[in-house]
Image: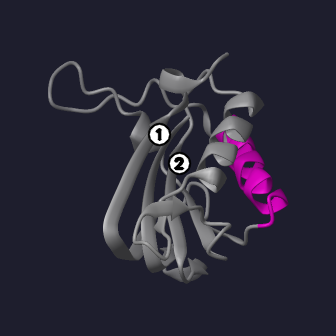
């Protein structure tokens, strides 16, 4: 799984022209599910994001997690994170998981965040979405479970 995480003061999603998820202070997470990802990666990535210390403490050090600051997470599925751009100029999405299973893992990922006590706003899987964000910092982190998991 791949995730692009942005610290934000607020974010929202419009899906197929209708309001969907929205949050105030917290994290926007764009989530890509690769073809060989499993429930293991969904739980591992959710745990890493929940505990990621990218909010500042009283000494202006990035030392607090989204949970520590009472923040929320807006999770938006984004298969284009699985793009393979090695050949030519048109991205290939052959490494992205097929939609039914990808949606299942996306929902599992959101469930893990929610069970950690964090409010989760969501996009609409497979919809045409516009994501609006007021980035804070900006702080942007990219995580890829293929690189750091201990599977």
Drawn side of residue 138 relative to residue 81, left or right: left
Residue at point 42%, 62% (across, down): 6
Q: CA distance from mark 1 to mark 2?
A: 10 Å
In terms of depth relative to the viewer, which is nearer, 55 or 58?
58
Vertical placement of residue 150 versus 142, above or below: above
Q: Position of residue 135 (x, y in %)?
A: 35, 73
N-terminal label among 1 and 2: 2
Q: Secondary structure at mark 2?
A: strand
Point out residue 52 in the picture as x, y percentages from the top left corner.
56, 52
Residue drawn 77% across the image and 47% down it: 108
Which of 119 and 61 lies nearest the eye of the viewer? Answer: 61
Disc 1 marks which residue? 143
Residue 31 has which mark?
2
Task: Say if the magenta span includes residue 59.
Answer: no
Quadrant location of the C terminus in the rendered image: top right
Magenta span covers which residues? 100-117
């Amino acid at each position: 799984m791949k995730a692009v995480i942005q610290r934000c003061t607020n974010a929202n999603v419009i899906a197929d022209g209708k309001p969907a998820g929205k949050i105030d202070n917290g994290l926007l997470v764009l989530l890509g599910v690769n073809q060989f990802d499993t429930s293991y990666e969904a739980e591992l990535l959710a745990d890493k994001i929940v505990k990621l210390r990218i909010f500042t403490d009283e000494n202006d050090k990035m030392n607090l997690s989204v949970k520590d600051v009472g923040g929320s997470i807006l999770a938006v599925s984004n298969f284009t994170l699985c793009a393979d751009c090695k050949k030519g100029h048109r991205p290939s999405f052959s490494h992205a998981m097929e939609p039914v299973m990808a949606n299942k893992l996306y929902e599992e990922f959101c469930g893990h965040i929610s069970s950690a006590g964090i409010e989760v706003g969501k996009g609409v899987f497979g919809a045409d979405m516009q994501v609006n964000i007021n980035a804070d910092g900006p702080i942007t982190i990219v995580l890829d479970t293929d690189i750091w998991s201990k599977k």
